[in-house]
Image (tube, helix red, strand yellow):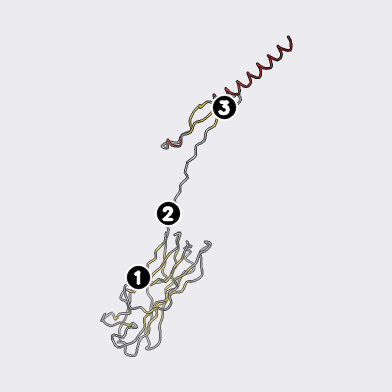
Amino acid sequence: MLKTKIKKAIALASIAGIAATNLSSVYATNIGTATVTGAPGLTQNIVWDNNFPGTASGSVTGVTVTAQVLPSLNMTLSTSTINLGTLIAGTPASGTVNIEVGTNAADGVTITARSGSGWLTNVDDNAIQINNLTTDGIAESYTFASTANAIDSTVSGFTTTGDLATTQVNSNSTEHVIYTTNKPERFDGAAADVTFTVAATSDAQTQAGSYQDVITFTVTGNF
């Protein structure tokens, strides 16, 4: 009789334990919500495990961190006048302007130079020009060229291309590419990134007078 009672007691205790475990599992309770203002689709329940001591938890996934860096682009030319001096027939005369550029454009910059008149033009008679065209019966020369200088960018993979080989200028619409990069670079003002050179050669028959050309330099950031 005693053994039977003991067996019944053990069986009841086991059933009670199983029931308690099942009740705890079945009746885990949603005790609140984790929400994001303005984003109801991110709402999740906070669930308690119905135990003391116990825990309750809920997670929100989808909170986005954003930021912005504003674009920056600067260019400085070393002078507003390139003086070729007095031209001597058959002897090239040249002058330069140094250009410093800085930007945070992801794909770097492009700098172009465009002749305003397409050649060196006589200031008193615009029909008279110094260039390599021979329609006036005189073969002269007016050229642009450029050379990139020491790199001041610290960005890995930075390169410069687009050095302009000596090019005859006889158009006022051509944008001559004189400097191209592929990544950001510093604007330190200490050393020019590119040196632009203008050269002219007159002929013994080139009409006397003053000549000029107005050049437009354009920098484009490739953001």
Q: Look at mark 2 in the image and give the residue it sits on.
A: 70
Quarter that holds the N terminus: top right
Q: Residues within 10 Å of mark 2 (few under 14, many from 20)?
A: few
* Contact between labelled residues 3 and 1, with CB atoms less than 8 Å apart: no
Q: Look at mark 3 in the image and give the residue it sits on.
A: 49
| Left or right of 218 on screen, residue 44 | right
Residue in the image at 50% along x and 67% along y: 159
Q: CA distance from mark 3 to mark 2?
A: 49 Å
Assign a secondary structure to mark 3.
loop
Q: Look at mark 1 in the image and give the residue it sits on.
A: 216
Q: Position of residue 2 (x, y in %)?
A: 74, 10
Please tell me which residue lies in front, 42 or 159: 42
Of the numbered discs 1 and 3, the one sitting upstream in the chain is 3
Assign a secondary structure to mark 1.
strand
Q: CA distance from mark 1 to mark 2?
A: 26 Å
Of the numbered discs 3 and 2, the one sitting upstream in the chain is 3
**Camera-side mark, 1 or 3:** 3
Q: Residues within 10 Å of mark 1 (few under 14, many from 20)?
A: few
**Against 131, is 63 above or below?**
above
Q: Residues within 10 Å of mark 3 (few under 14, many from 20)?
A: some
